[in-house]
Image (cartoon, helix red, strand yellow):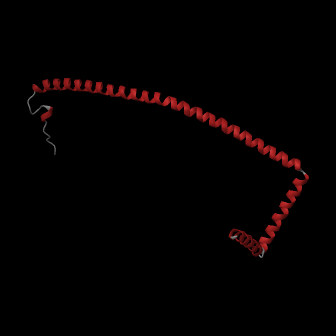
Amino acid sequence: MGSSKLGRFILGGAIIGAAVSMLDRATRQSTATSARVSYEKIMYYKENPDLVKNQFQEKKDKVQSLVEQVKGDVGYIKAQVDEIKTLTPQVKEMFTDTKEAFSEAKTEYQQIIDEDSNQSSAETNQEDGSLPPMVQKKNVVSLVK
């Protein structure tokens, strides 16, 4: 029972609201123009039903071609994602191998540098040993302040 009254009151409120809004002249003119244009379109399409059918067919064809294009795009993207999924472990392994190679090369380079610095310091120590302590590079005293 309560829902039937609610529906009636909502409908009554809508009718009263429409009647009040028609008191404004601009609203009346706009509504009359819209109603006239809609009526003319309805009569035009009533007299020419083939136009409606053709327009509907064109829209249908556009939507179908769009759906086919989207299907193709989705298929392409899916193929690319699958390819990336298969390549990811290979790329990960390649990065790991590269990282290991660089780490090994780093340690080898560090050893070479350490050997070179040891040899050059030994040569420097031999040369410095022949000089008096005040002249040796490690014992240079700065005279300029």
Question: Position of 87 compared to 51: left or right?
Answer: left
Identify which residue is drawn at 78% across, 72% down: 26
Which residue reaches farthest left? 132
Percent x, y of residue 118: 19, 25
Question: Position of 71 compared to 130: left or right?
Answer: right
Percent x, y of residue 122: 16, 24
Does 108 sit above or below residue 24? above
Residue situated in front as seen by the camera: 119 or 6: 6
Does 133 sit above or below residue 64? above
Percent x, y of residue 17: 73, 73
Q: Quadrant of the C terminus?
A: top left
Identify which residue is drawn at 10% across, 27% down: 131
Question: Position of 137 compared to 4: left or right?
Answer: left
Identify which residue is drawn at 22% across, 24% down: 115
Does 66 sit above or below residue 92? below
Which residue reaches farthest right? 47
Percent x, y of residue 51: 86, 48
Does 36 sit above or below residue 25? above
- Which image quarter: residue 124? top left
Q: Quadrant of the N terminus?
A: bottom right
Residue situated in front as seen by the camera: 91 or 132: 91
- Which image quarter: residue 59? top right
